[in-house]
Amino acid sequence: MTPLLQGLVTIVLGVGGCIAYFYGANLLLDKVLFPARGPKIGRNITRANMVRPWLFLFPALFVLGLYLAYPVVGSFWRSLYGRDGDSFIGLGNYQALFADETFRTAVVNNLLWVLVVPAAATFFGLIAAQLTDRLSWGNIAKSIIFMPMAISFVGASLIWKFVYANDADIGLINAIRTGLGADEAVDVMQVPFWNNFFLMVILIWIQTGFAMVILSAALRGIPEETVEAAIIDGANPFQIFFRIKVPQIMGTIVVVWTTITFLVLKVFDIVYTMTGGNFGTQILPSYMMSYMFRDDGRATAVAFVIMLIVLPVMVWNILQARKELR
Amino acid sequence: MADLRLKGVGKSYGAVEVLKDIDLDIGTGELVVFVGPSGCGKSTLLRMIAGLEKITAGTLDIDGVAMNDVPPAQRGIAMVFQSYALYPHMSVRDNMAFSLKIARKTRAEIDAAVEKAARMLQLEPYLDRLPKALSGGQRQRVAIGRAIVRDPKVYLFDEPLSNLDAALRVATRIEIAQLKEAMPQSTMIYVTHDQVEAMTLADRIVVLADKRIAQAGPPLELYQRPMTEFVAQFIGSPAMNLLAGEIAEAGEVTRLRLPEGGGTIAADIPTRPDDVGRKVNVGIRPEDMVATDGDDYAYEGRVEIVEALGEVTQLYFERSRPEHDPVIAKLPGVHTGLRGEAVRMTADPARVHLFAEGRSLLWR
Ligand SMILES: Nc1ncnc2c1ncn2[C@@H]1O[C@H](COP(=O)(O)OP(=O)(O)OP(=O)(O)O)[C@@H](O)[C@H]1O
Ligand SMILES: [Mg+2]
């Protein structure tokens, strides 16, 4: 079968199957299970109407359950088994995790990432949104700031490898150092502790554009009159920005912040590409990747820890987003 | 306490001229109302006084000090916006206190000023609420309160009541009148579309049209002695009828011939002998029209529509030409039986207006 024919068959089967399911199930409900006739006609109609929503929701619920809920349970189950996947070791993987020095480094680093990256990206995004708003060339500036969003994390990391290169002829950082009189190039990626921040800069560089675009739209939504009222009330530009504008878009700021927080908890590519988690830069996702295929039990245990960390942020984010909608 | 003086003020957005040659003196304690058709620049003029728009020509003085380049906060003005413009994230108290906090007043001073304004506007029960938990009328009062706490020399209102429903508008209008009474030293400038607001609140009405001031004066003067056809038709509702006519006899009392559906009437307006034969528009307000059987009449026509409002009845006559506005008469009492009837209308000579080339013959 040619791929074209395959695709066509899939579409016909998929769409046809859906129609057949909805039509058939509905028919079954109305004609066979609770027929709208006979002595119990009233009760039957009521019951059929109670069942019907579930009938229509079932496919979606089933797929969600299969691909979202089951994997959570399945992963947890797998994390209770050892490297070979046959020997049940209870919470052994978790014990080993917490005993592992690298894991603890990863947790601490991850915490740093979660504190710094969303805050910095949101802050710079907000500043960029405000500063570019009234400029004639603001849209060009915005496009440039937004561009990194279109680059993959690995691609971005490669770019920054040049910036951080251990060679004053290639690396920007070392070029600046040399320009300021330093005589030897350093490997930026090996500077203890601070190397974490150099890695974070990459993600901030990428995410600032995202924050800027969303916040810029929110800033535009602020009623102009409130700003004018503040001008008449004597507020200076800083006071207008921080006391009138920012509070009015707080909901959006929180959503942007939490959205970036999720992303931070998922990003492994940057660390993986730049340092491979060496020199004390390990974070949870890259730590997980380092166990993948070697010890799936351990890797799923890390995945589960990550999920537990993300969960509260997620709930908070959903609540905020709902509040925004209202 | 403020004298406001506008001298040759104009506004252009690039090549587009919106206002020009605005000359206006506003005295201390005066309440001046700007009216005019939509888009004539009322808000723009107000915003130039506030300092929110740059003045592109002429000068603005407040108490003799040039204000063109003084920032809004230092002009001694406060502004109340049509959309209220309350800070949505601040309580009523904080909304009112904001300007004082910016000015670094002490806690005690701020509290005293806010409490006083709240008492004046009956806002005390709502001080800790957010604006979204207030009704439109309450929000507007907060906006006014925010202006009051600053104790400005000049209050600027841009259609403050237009977002309120009819009943609330009347109530708030009366509150503003009382407020003015309580603060006789405050100068107020008020923009509105509402005739009744303009007539009842104003010490002086300024009609803006065609980029300029068409006429400025006390409300009744504008009503009784409009300078131009435009002002005559703009003030009063329904608008003044304009009937094509010709001066038949000049003198202390002018006699007019009205060829289109009319006879002859007199007007208490002096004219010169050389005016005889001049084409004029005879202006009669709908409420000045009276039914008559005599031979001196201004207009005769068939009544097409009758609007009985209870206290008055409005008659719309058939148009002689489709492009003309219908002649309207407003008679006291109920006259529902007049539909389809031919009715003859005249007016008291003292209440007839005459316009030649758009300008009133009274003002030459
Ligand atoms: N930024 C601008 N650029 C060009 N023209 C403008 C600008 N702002 C306002 N105008 C024009 O200035 C004129 C006056 O506007 P303004 O808002 O003062 O009218 P207004 O009398 O307050 O009308 P309304 O009664 O509808 O509120 C309008 O014709 C408008 O199109
Ligand atoms: Mg306006």
Image (tube, coloured by chain):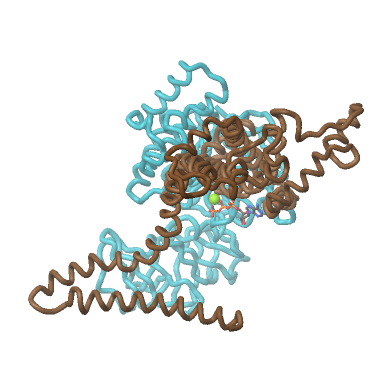
Chain colours: A brown, B cyan
Q: Is residue B171 left or right of residue B235?
A: left
Q: Quick check: can you spot residue B157? A: no
Q: Looking at the picture, how far across and down is residue B231, in whole percent?
A: 53, 56
User: Is residue B106 positioned above or below B314 on the image?
Assistant: above
The residue at the far left in this view is A39
Nearest the viewer among A47 and A254 is A47
Say which quarter of the image contains residue B118.
top left
Q: Residue at x 73, y 42 (%)?
A: A274
Q: Looking at the picture, how far across and down is residue A46, in whole percent?
A: 18, 68
Q: Residue at x 18, y 73 (%)?
A: A34
Q: Looking at the picture, how far across and down is residue B25, in whole percent?
A: 61, 38
Q: Quadrant of the C terminus of chain B?
A: bottom right
Q: Residue at x 54, y 57 (%)?
A: B37
Nearest the viewer among B106 and B35 is B106
User: Is residue B72 positioned above or below A21 on the image?
Assistant: above
Q: Quick check: can you spot residue A245? A: yes
User: Is residue A309 positioned above or below B363 on the image?
Assistant: above
Say which quarter of the image contains residue A114.
top right
